[in-house]
Image (cartoon, helix red, strand yellow):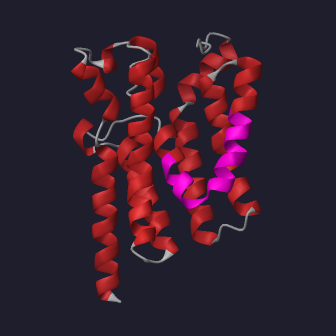
Amino acid sequence: MANDQILLMLLLAAAYLLGSIPTGLLLGKAYGIDVRKEGSGNIGATNLYRTIGRKVGVMTLVGDCLKGMLPVLAVKFAGLPFEYAAWVGLAAFCGHVFSLFLRFKGGKGVATALGVFLALSPLAVAVALGVFVLLMLIWRYVSLGSICAAAVMPIAVWALDGGRVLIVVTMLIAVVVIIRHIENIKRLVAGTENRFKA
């Protein structure tokens, strides 16, 4: 029992450290730009897309997604309990949002959460992505799509009988994602939020 707890703590620490790697910031600096001082100041894919370009935005999206997906898949492939995979996913997500390398600041967590849930509950992701795409097609606000997709995820996981631990982890991630979008919500209400331009 004690060994299991030590193993879980080590896995959580490793996942957190991986999640803490600031993909967008590193890619931006590779192009000579500190994205924290450009655009929205966020280190996520949307700001990289707007400030540097599509290629770097996509690279950031993929990198942040992999930070969430890889540690969860590693736990699953190792044959460890599914609950371990869920908590490891949460740790990777927290690493991105509260990065050790950025004095516990970070991104909004959408792409990393996507990676986590692609590994944990791909069917729930399909539901959330459907909501995201629909809202993007109608209003073209990335933030609105992200917020609503996050809100739908716990419901989708519950409907798909994801289990208590996964439901709790999903709710925690959804709440953090929505809170991280508070400024976007204010701009949406005020009508000043930027629309996505392909």
Query: Which residue is painted at 66% across and 13% down in the image?
Result: 190
* Part of the protein shown in magenta: 115-132
x and y, in percent, of residue 164 in the image: 63, 71
Q: Is residue 40 above or below residue 79?
A: above
Query: Which residue is painted at 54% across and 40% down in the image?
Result: 177
x and y, in percent, of residue 109 in the image: 47, 40
Query: Which residue is painted at 49% across and 48% down in the image?
Result: 115
Residue 144, image quadrant: top right
* Most foreground residue, 70 or 167: 70
x and y, in percent, of residue 33 in the image: 26, 15
Q: Is residue 71 above or below residue 66?
A: below
Residue 31, image quadrant: top left
Which quadrant, please, contains the N terminus?
bottom left
Instruction: Give the main secondary structure, helix, strand or loop, of the magenta stretch.
Output: helix
Q: Is residue 39 above or below residue 86?
A: above
Which quadrant, please, contains the C terminus?
top right
x and y, in percent, of residue 78 in the image: 39, 74
Q: Going by the picture, which residue comes out furthest to the bottom? A: 1
Q: Is residue 49 left or right of residue 35?
A: right
